Image (spheres, coloured by chain):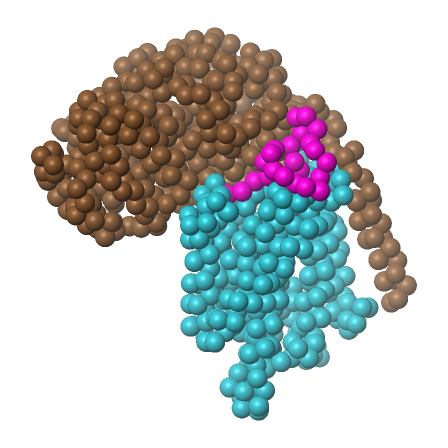
Chain colours: A brown, B cyan
């Protein structure tokens, strides 16, 4: 017994010793970068919420990814690949390799999202990770991809942090952010509601809520509005009546709901039920504003969204060639128009593939270089720039309004104005953070 | 060996063998085969197996021995994580201070929470711990955002102080390491069609898991462990005999809190990120599931339960309709679509459903968890030979509470 024990101990000790004594050469040196594709195919990782509060958005994102893969491999009608100004993609996969994909469930939790992304990178050899439907997840997965040495193409994430204080050299975002929402909304609000309003903010108590409140406050105060109060509401709140009553007692005449998803549906419904919109305060009609709109939220809130202003990244009723082509091929495949989540993820997948083609490699550093400062058009948002300093896309922002007479369950928002990119562009350094250097891994 | 009896020594060796050879055991299918979908031998999942194993072992010391069902253990996991990430940001990316501090901080907080919660027992104790955990979650998610990073959590940044580390080389990013050995350092071993991944971080976590397991055996077999069992079987009687059981239960609570802290610290060491949802009540519920699934009060059961749940979460959740279609592609079209439609609700996003069904079946048919199942199979093989009833070493002895 004792001999066996000693020998076993020595053995396991030796294994551990070898593990510890061998520092950095203990890494895979076969390739110049992480997960370099070897066979005739390349694997992309689609990491979307399939359960949890944003499962609807996640499902739509996944549909868009499947459509993008089909188009990249030469199937379908090509969608926005035909209207895209860069013609590097030939419909034969990426760099001649057939596009394969793996999917995972982020559960809208940073931990689960990272676990799922890590399994895609370590097990399925994904060379790029994309998706996500909240900023917490996007920031967490982006940091992971930076460490692992793969590219991250962010999905639905609206917080300034993703390309602000938490930006990373391997991460890219096509979606717009809180700052742009504020900058696009303010002039429209000024024109419609006047420049001497008193605003009351209800803000979801987490990062995205803070950055959105700050963005809307800054831009509305700059044009002369006054902020009466800004109250934080717990994310898990479902009944907002106790938060609406103080609004009635204040002398505010505008309510800003910095809420997203189910939060927004509930708070807006409560506010309308309390008769806020029929009130006259300071001789003006009481108004409600929702800085970030999505079609899925408008659907949830039903008739309550009528006439309420907000901003959105993209809407299927846009009439440019790119949007029309995308809506057509998405509609033919799935039978209904795509949401903004589907649009941004589809565009991200195509942009990544195009960058690989132009760089001639899947190496994250080459791809990042191809994306940085890239200017393109024909993807539904007009001329767009992928800014090199913070990897954020700059493009037109849509200001929308709940439609008074919707014709179908998808036709809930109407576009009020397309705010030009120049008006929402900001200096890359205002949010702090460091981009760092690109990491090819291995 | 090391003060263990023969049976425990054997168990310890089994666990050591499993941990050491996990990269091979968990990758039974060749990389290119269709079954490779079920391989679990990649670093992230192996690390999770042992880390959540530690978490469940610690939880079992409280729940399995004293019968006190804590519904807020994830709070200690999260606190350990935050402590560890702050050590990495402030002191050094070396994992040792991070792991030590995470155990200490989780221990201190569990002392406070345990001292308050243990004034009650049964369901009231469970509710109290649940309340504390949800408070911790709410604080981390919003109120304490400057310290915890709120929704976006914390990660090492390029411009963190890291006072003990040399400045980073240009273009390098901070990586968790043990005296220069990076946690992500990996050696890939190709044998024929098989690909085995030997990962440094996994073996470090595995070593700690073995230490944690050994300590748990010693606690189970000690007079202290016997006192805890006495509390479980009848706390009132213990009190009537003039013994004050509170110090024992509190000690068990703090020990299991420290185990959770260690697990939290290791999570950060392996994957340098800490977020609040780690403390959400579902995470606390998960460790209860792990323990019950594996076998409450058994030594190795919680580890198996942890592995089982993490396997479901990471492998089954990744099977999508495309994969299903590939599996059934050999069948005629109608048949294929039918089978895909039948199986689809149970894989991918439906993995919770599969887990729930399995959990139900195990609780109904095997109240002692996976360990009872193992025991039954073993008995069958021994031709139903009556083996000696050594109750202390009887693995599947205690049914779920």
The residue closer to the viewer here, B401 or B28, is B401
Residue at the extreme bottom: B241
Image quadrant holding the N terminus of chain B, namely bottom right
Determine if the magenta segment contains residue B156.
yes
Name the residue located 48 percent from the left edge and 35 percent from the top edge: A138
Name the residue located 70 percent from the left edge and 23 percent from the top edge: A32
Percent position (x, y) of residue A27?
74, 34
Q: Is residue B210 visible?
A: yes
Name the residue located 57 percent from the left edge and 90 percent from the top edge: B242
* Number of numbered discs overlaid on the protein picture: 0
> Would residue A408 be found to the left or right of residue B116 on screen?
left
Percent position (x, y) of residue A117?
55, 37
Main secondary structure type of the part rendered in magenta: loop
Question: Image height check: is B38 above or below A361?
Answer: below
The residue closer to the viewer here, A327 or A205, is A205
The residue closer to the viewer here, B146 or A290, is B146
The residue closer to the viewer here, A133 or A244, is A244
> Would residue A131 be found to the left or right of residue B80 on screen?
left
Q: Can residue A408 be seen in this view?
A: no
- Write the start and end of the magenta stretch as one range: B153-175
> Would residue A253 be found to the left or right of residue B167 on screen?
left
The quadrant holding residue B37 is top right
Percent position (x, y) of residue A422?
36, 15
Name the residue located 19 percent from the left edge and 40 percent from the top edge: A252
Percent position (x, y) of residue A370?
55, 14
Question: Image height check: is B216 above or below B144?
Answer: below
> Would residue B91 be found to the left or right of residue A386 on screen?
right
Determine if the magenta segment contains residue A35.
no
């Amino acid at each position: 017994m004792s001999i066996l024990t000693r020998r076993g101990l020595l053995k396991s000790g030796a294994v551990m010793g070898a593990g510890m004594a061998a520092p950095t050469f203990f890494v895979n040196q076969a390739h110049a970068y992480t997960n370099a594709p070897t066979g005739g195919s390349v694997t992309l990782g689609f990491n979307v919420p399939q359960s949890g509060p944003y499962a609807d958005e996640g499902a739509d994102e996944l549909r868009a990814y499947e459509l993008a893969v089909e188009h990249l491999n030469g199937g379908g009608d090509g969608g926005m690949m035909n209207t895209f100004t860069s013609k590097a993609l030939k419909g034969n996969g990426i760099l001649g390799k057939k596009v394969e994909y793996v999917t995972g469930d982020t559960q809208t939790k940073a931990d689960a999202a990272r676990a799922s992304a890590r399994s895609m990178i370590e097990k399925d050899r994904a060379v790029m990770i994309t998706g996500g439907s909240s900023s917490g997840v996007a920031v967490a997965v982006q940091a992971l991809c930076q460490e692992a040495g793969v590219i991250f193409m962010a999905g639905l994430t609206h917080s300034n942090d993703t390309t602000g204080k938490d930006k990373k050299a391997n991460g890219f975002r096509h979606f717009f952010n809180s700052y742009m929402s504020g900058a696009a909304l303010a002039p429209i609000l000024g024109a419609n509601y006047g420049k001497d309003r008193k605003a009351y903010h209800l803000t979801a108590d987490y990062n995205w809520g803070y950055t959105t409140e700050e963005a809307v406050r800054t831009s509305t105060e700059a044009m002369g509005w006054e902020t009466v109060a800004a109250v934080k509401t717990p994310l898990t709140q479902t009944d907002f009546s106790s938060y609406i009553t103080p609004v009635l007692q204040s002398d505010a005449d505008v309510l800003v709901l910095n809420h997203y998803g189910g939060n927004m549906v509930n708070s807006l419904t409560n506010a309308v039920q309390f008769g806020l919109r029929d009130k006259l305060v300071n001789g003006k009609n009481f108004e409600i504003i929702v800085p970030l709109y999505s079609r899925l939220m408008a659907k949830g809130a039903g008739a309550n969204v009528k006439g309420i202003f907000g901003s959105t990244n993209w809407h299927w009723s846009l009439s440019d060639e790119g949007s029309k082509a995308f809506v057509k091929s998405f509609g033919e495949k799935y039978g209904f128009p795509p949401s903004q989540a589907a649009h941004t993820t589809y565009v991200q997948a195509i942009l990544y593939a195009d960058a690989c083609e132009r760089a001639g490699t899947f190496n994250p550093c080459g791809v990042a270089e191809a994306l940085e400062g890239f200017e393109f058009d024909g993807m539904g948002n007009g001329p767009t720039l992928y800014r090199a300093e913070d990897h954020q896309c700059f493009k037109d922002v849509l200001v929308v309004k709940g439609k008074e007479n919707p014709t179908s369950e998808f036709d809930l928002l109407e576009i009020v104005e397309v705010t030009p990119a120049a008006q929402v562009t900001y200096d890359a350094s205002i949010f702090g953070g460091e981009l760092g250097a690109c990491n090819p891994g291995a | 060996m090391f003060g263990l009896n023969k049976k425990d020594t054997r168990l310890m060796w089994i666990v050591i063998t499993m941990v050491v050879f996990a990269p091979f055991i968990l990758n039974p299918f060749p990389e290119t085969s269709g079954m490779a979908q079920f391989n679990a031998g990649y670093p992230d999942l192996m690390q999770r197996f042992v880390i959540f194993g530690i978490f469940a072992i610690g939880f079992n010391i409280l729940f399995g021995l004293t019968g006190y069902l804590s519904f807020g253990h994830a709070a200690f996991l999260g606190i350990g994580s935050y402590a560890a990430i702050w050590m990495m940001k402030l002191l050094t990316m070396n994992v040792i201070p991070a792991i030590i501090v995470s155990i200490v901080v989780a221990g201190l907080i569990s002392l406070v929470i345990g001292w308050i919660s243990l004034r009650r027992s049964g369901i009231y104790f469970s509710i109290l711990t649940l309340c504390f955990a949800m408070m911790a979650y709410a604080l981390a998610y919003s109120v304490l955002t400057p310290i915890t990073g709120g929704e976006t959590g914390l990660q090492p940044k390029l411009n963190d102080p890291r006072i003990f580390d040399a400045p980073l080389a240009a273009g390098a990013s901070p990586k968790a390491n043990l005296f220069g050995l990076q946690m992500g350092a990996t050696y890939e071993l190709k044998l024929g069609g098989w690909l085995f991944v030997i990962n440094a971080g996994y073996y470090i976590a595995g070593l700690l898991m073995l230490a944690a397991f050994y300590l748990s055996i010693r606690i189970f077999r000690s007079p202290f462990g016997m006192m805890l069992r006495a509390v479980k079987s009848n706390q009132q009687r213990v009190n009537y005999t003039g013994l004050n059981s509170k110090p024992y239960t509190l000690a068990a609570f703090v020990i299991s809190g420290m185990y959770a802290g260690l697990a939290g610290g290791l999570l950060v060491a392996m994957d340098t990120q800490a977020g609040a949802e780690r403390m959400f009540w579902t995470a606390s519920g998960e460790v209860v599931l792990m323990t019950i699934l594996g076998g409450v009060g058994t030594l190795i059961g919680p580890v198996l339960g942890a592995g089982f749940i993490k396997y479901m979460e990471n492998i089954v959740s990744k099977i999508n309709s495309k994969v299903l279609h590939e599996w059934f592609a050999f069948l005629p079209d109608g048949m294929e679509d039918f089978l895909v439609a039948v199986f689809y609700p149970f894989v991918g996003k439906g993995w919770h459903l599969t887990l729930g069904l399995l959990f139900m079946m195990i609780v109904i048919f095997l109240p002692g968890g996976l360990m009872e199942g193992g025991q039954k199979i073993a008995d069958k093989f021994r031709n139903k030979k009556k083996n000696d009833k050594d109750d202390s070493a009887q693995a599947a002895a205690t049914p779920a509470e």
